[in-house]
């Protein structure tokens, strides 16, 4: 048995086999060839095999996820057979007398740069596709097995498993078949990364920062993940297995006890009420929101709809997703945050430039204000879906009143366009902003005049206030989520909101920190939005708190 220690993200226990996800990093060599015809033949053979693979994928996807989602494999087939793409590869082979792999690599780079530079958002999205198709050819040419680089296609994944990796980015995380993942264990990663947030929202044990001791060789080996202590037992001995099964059963009993709080009010012993909502990233999360009896959804991270897609989600796709959540939640409030892409949340088809400081860069509302077409599509979907339930809209990464003024102008245009087109929408939708920059907290008295509510994003507020990159695990020793500066900024925002008769919630991870629940209640925070799996735990804490003492 090998015992590893890391940083716990969510406290629970799971037992299962490890699947180690290895990301492939390809190095393409360039070498001279004498027989260019032989290289061209290799290309033609790889292409034929690629077409067969894509056809099989198309047919499988058609059955599994429907025609609209399967269409991507048809597009890839078309690309593979595109004449310009062929000519480029063959020209490079013959004119430079080089190997086919190099010719494919250069062609992929050139074509994706060309697509990226186009004005049309749809064509920009093709940049990622041409890379994908080229990657398929290269994989066929070098005969590498891609089964463990594509989690959902791997044959070993019929049974639930423990996912191990160096780290995962959000675009990889969203592709997981979540019903199969028992727990996450990562070599790197920080407790505040979006993958960690996802693990918390799934309510599964997760441990990050385990280091290189977590070896790819452990693929297929049984392990126990103890998310309470941040410990992983690889190939556990029978005694450990017994102890851990006992601990797992006790944790299960505790969860059962918490269930008794379903249907109960979130009210302190001295009668102060607070709303406890849940955070989601996907329409399919609504089930856990309801089963944990959250009183609403305090943060729907809409960017996950974008991350799941290979291209910009259409207005209709978004409308249906928002409508579904609103209807499933019936009269309960659903706060949908507009697109918060950028920084660690990257989708290839946005073609965002590489930045020196992405967290301080082109992200969230900045993208929406600079690329209003993207923003307007989402706003149209939101205002249309608002007819079907109790939807509120929230804007991320706000730093000034000017941004809100600009947002209001765009909203006005969207409403005018919908009216002119005779498309029904709800006119009067509650709108709020995230307080997740120190600037927003400091000017919150002005911002409160402009919006209906605030929601504090403590993950980013902490990152920007303490100047600590939330993704950088090396900085964990300096990470102080209870730092007085952060609590002061939250209090300032709360006072500003209340002075204007507005309400304020907390939707960052700190909202679920029960050691701060009393302090938040004393500040008069009106709502806490937490992972669905934490709703009842926080309700328990609220019901045990007496503010009269
Ligand atoms: C936050 O920053 O606290 C937040 C809730 O948003 P996200 O974690 O998605 O950045
Ligand atoms: Mg944030």
Image: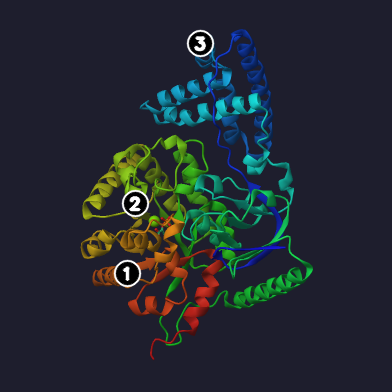
- Placement of 220 over or under 107, stated as above or below: below
Name the residue carrying label 2. Answer: 427
Q: CA distance from mark 1 to mark 3?
A: 61 Å
Residue 433 is labelled as none
Q: Quadrant of the N terminus?
A: bottom right
Q: Residue furthest right?
A: 238
Q: Position of residue 456 (x, y in %)?
A: 36, 64
* Number of residues whose C-alpha sits closer than 10 Å to that of mark 1, classed few (under 14), some (14–19) or many (20 or more): many
Please report whichever mark, 1 or 3, sits nearer to the chain's N-terminal start.
Answer: 3
Q: Quadrant of residue 214?
A: bottom right
Residue 490 is labelled as 1
Name the residue carrying label 3. Answer: 91
Q: Colour scheme of this structure image?
A: rainbow
Q: CA distance from mark 2 to mark 3?
A: 57 Å
- Placement of 298 over or under 88, stated as above or below: below
Q: Position of residue 301 (x, y in %)?
A: 45, 53
State yes or no: discs 1 and 3 in contact (Cβ < 8 Å).
Answer: no
Q: Secondary structure at mark 1?
A: helix
Q: Position of residue 149 (x, y in %)?
A: 62, 40
- Between disc 2 and disc 3, the foreground one is 3
What is the total number of numbered labels drawn onto the structure image? 3
Tell me: 273 left or right of 256.
Answer: left
Please report whichever mark, 2 or 1, sits nearer to the chain's N-terminal start.
Answer: 2
Q: Is residue 114 visible?
A: yes
Q: Is residue 415 visible?
A: no
């Amino acid at each position: 048995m090998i015992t590893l220690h890391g940083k716990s993200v969510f406290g629970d226990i799971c037992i299962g086999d490890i699947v180690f996800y290895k990301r492939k990093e390809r190095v393409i060599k360039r070498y001279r060839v004498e027989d260019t015809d032989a290289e061209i033949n290799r290309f033609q053979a790889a292409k034929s095999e690629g077409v067969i693979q894509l056809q099989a994928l198309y047919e499988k996807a058609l059955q599994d996820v429907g025609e609209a989602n399967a269409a991507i494999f048809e597009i890839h087939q078309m690309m593979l057979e595109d004449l310009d793409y062929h000519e480029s590869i063959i020209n490079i082979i013959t004119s430079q007398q080089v190997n086919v792999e190099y010719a494919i690599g250069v062609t992929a780079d050139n074509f994706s740069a060309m697509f990226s530079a186009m004005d049309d958002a749809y064509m920009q999205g093709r940049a990622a596709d041409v890379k994908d198709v080229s990657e398929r050819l290269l994989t066929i040419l070098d005969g590498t097995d891609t089964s463990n680089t594509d989690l959902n296609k791997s044959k070993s994944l019929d049974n639930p498993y423990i996912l191990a990796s160096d780290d995962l980015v959000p675009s990889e995380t969203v592709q997981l078949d979540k019903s199969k993942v028992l727990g996450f264990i990562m070599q790197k990663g920080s407790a505040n990364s979006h993958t960690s947030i996802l693990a918390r929202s799934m309510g599964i044990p997760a441990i990050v920062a385990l280091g290189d001791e977590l070896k790819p060789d452990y693929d297929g080996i049984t392990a126990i993940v103890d998310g309470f202590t941040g410990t992983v037992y690889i190939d556990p001995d029978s005694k450990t297995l017994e102890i851990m099964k006992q601990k797992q059963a006790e944790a299960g009993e505790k969860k059962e006890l918490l269930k008794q709080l379903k249907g109960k009010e979130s009210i302190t012993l001295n009668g102060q009420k607070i709303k406890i909502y849940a955070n989601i990233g996907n329409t399919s999360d609504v089930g856990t929101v309801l089963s944990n009896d959250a009183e609403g959804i305090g943060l729907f991270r809409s960017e996950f709809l974008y991350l799941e897609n290979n291209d910009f989600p259409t207005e209709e796709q978004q409308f249906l997703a928002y409508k579904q959540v609103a209807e499933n939640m019936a009269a309960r409030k659903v706060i949908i945050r507009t697109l918060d892409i950028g920084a660690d949340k990257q989708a290839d088809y946005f073609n965002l430039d590489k930045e020196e400081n992405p967290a301080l860069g082109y992200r969230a509302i900045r993208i929406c204000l600079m690329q209003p077409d993207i923003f307007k599509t989402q706003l149209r979907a939101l205002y249309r879906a608002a007819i079907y339930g109790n939807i509120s809209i929230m804007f991320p990464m706000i730093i000034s009143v000017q941004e809100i003024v600009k947002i209001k102008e765009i909203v006005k245009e969207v409403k005018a366009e919908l009216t002119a087109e005779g498309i029904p929408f709800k006119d009067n939708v509650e709108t709020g902003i995230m307080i997740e920059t120190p600037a927003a907290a400091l000017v919150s008295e002005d911002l409160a005049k402009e919006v209906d509510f605030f929601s504090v994003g403590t993950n980013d507020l902490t990152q920007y206030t303490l100047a600590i990159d939330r993704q950088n695990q090396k900085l964990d020793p300096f990470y102080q989520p209870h730092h007085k500066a952060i609590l002061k900024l939250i209090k300032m925002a709360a006072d500003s909101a209340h002075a204007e008769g507005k309400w304020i919630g907390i939707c960052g991870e700190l909202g679920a920190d029960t050691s701060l629940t009393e302090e938040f209640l004393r500040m008069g925070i009106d709502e806490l939005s937490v992972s669905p799996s934490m709703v009842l735990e926080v309700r328990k804490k609220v019901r045990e708190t007496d503010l009269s003492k």
